[in-house]
Image (cartoon, rainbow, N blue to C red):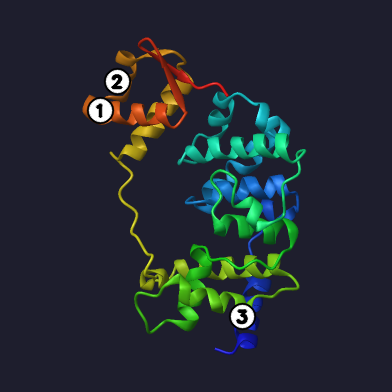
Amino acid sequence: MEPGIFRKTIRQYFQKYGRDLPWRRTRNPYHILVSEIMLQQTQVERVLGKYEQFISAFPDFASLAQAPLQSVLSVWQGLGYNRRAIALQRIAQTVTTDWDGILPSSVDLLIKLPGIGHATASAIAAFAFGKPSVFIETNIRRVFIHFYFHDRDDVRDSEILPLVEKTLVRSDPRRWYYALMDYGAMLKKQLQNPNRKSAHYQKQSPFKGSNRQIRGMALKTILEKPYITEAALLKKLNRDPEQILPVLYDLQKEGFIRKQGKRFHITNP
């Protein structure tokens, strides 16, 4: 498809059906950073319930950097993938101490921060600073497969990236990427999800009974009952100790919790 026709199709859809999301109403780099970290592996609907609550509790880099980890995790509860909350606080600490509280606009600098890969760094550069960075995320991938690779399987991102760059609206990358993402979100609701043709497609494993569920349950329990004993925690979780104990070990290793004697508590920064 010719780039001009492609852009027109996407823009017309966005003009009529574009989503009004709170992080799209700001150019505050901190607010956009928070939204991008939250949106990693998490649906927009779940982030909507937490974004403004998190910004209200921690309105800037300094307040997040200084907050007890227990407070950060308490507000984060319900989003899952809790290591993102630690990464976000460590970013705030780095920005506060190394960059005078100002988030850098360079993708090369952003990518060095905890929990930020190339796609997230490029998205922040585009949405917060208007830079014409080139990246792929799940909705963008879906759009390009739908229009350019509909008759193919095993489509690689390396094939899509040149098209993303070729069709990018460099004068307003922020609005263009929002339009792409909204068109992709619409495509997801169709019977045949185009992303199934991607070489990078992975069907998410069941959450119930998984280590990911146990991690969330353990953290929530320790947040609600600081210094809970190991015996009480095992009883509360009501799972096989052979499954729970390795999870608790990993949570300690990753810096979420600390064990003193036989009691667990959230790690202080």
Mark 3, residue position:
166
Q: Is residue 235 above or below residue 204?
A: above
Q: Nearer the viewer, mark 3 or mark 2?
A: 3
In x, y percent, where is residue 165? 61, 75
Distance between the Cα atoms at labels 3 and 1?
52 Å
Badge 2 vs badge 1, beta-carbon distance below 8 Å: yes
**Residue in the foreground of this view, choosing between 18 and 92:** 92
Q: Residue at x 62, y 48 (%)?
A: 35
Q: Earlier in the sequence, mark 2 or mark 1?
A: 2
Q: Quadrant of the N terminus?
A: bottom right
Q: Identify the disc placed on residue 234.
A: 2
- Disc 1 marks a residue whose amino acid type is Arg
Q: Residue at x 35, y 37 (%)?
A: 213
Mark 1, residue position:
239
Q: Is residue 240 visible?
A: no
Quadrant of the rendered image containing residue 169: bottom right
User: Pointer 1: residues within 10 angstroms few (<14), some, or many (20+)?
Assistant: few
Q: Residue at x 30, y 40 (%)?
A: 210
User: Pointer 3: residues within 10 angstroms few (<14), some, or many (20+)?
Assistant: few
Secondary structure of the residue carrying tag 1 is loop
Q: Is residue 243 above or below residue 197?
A: above
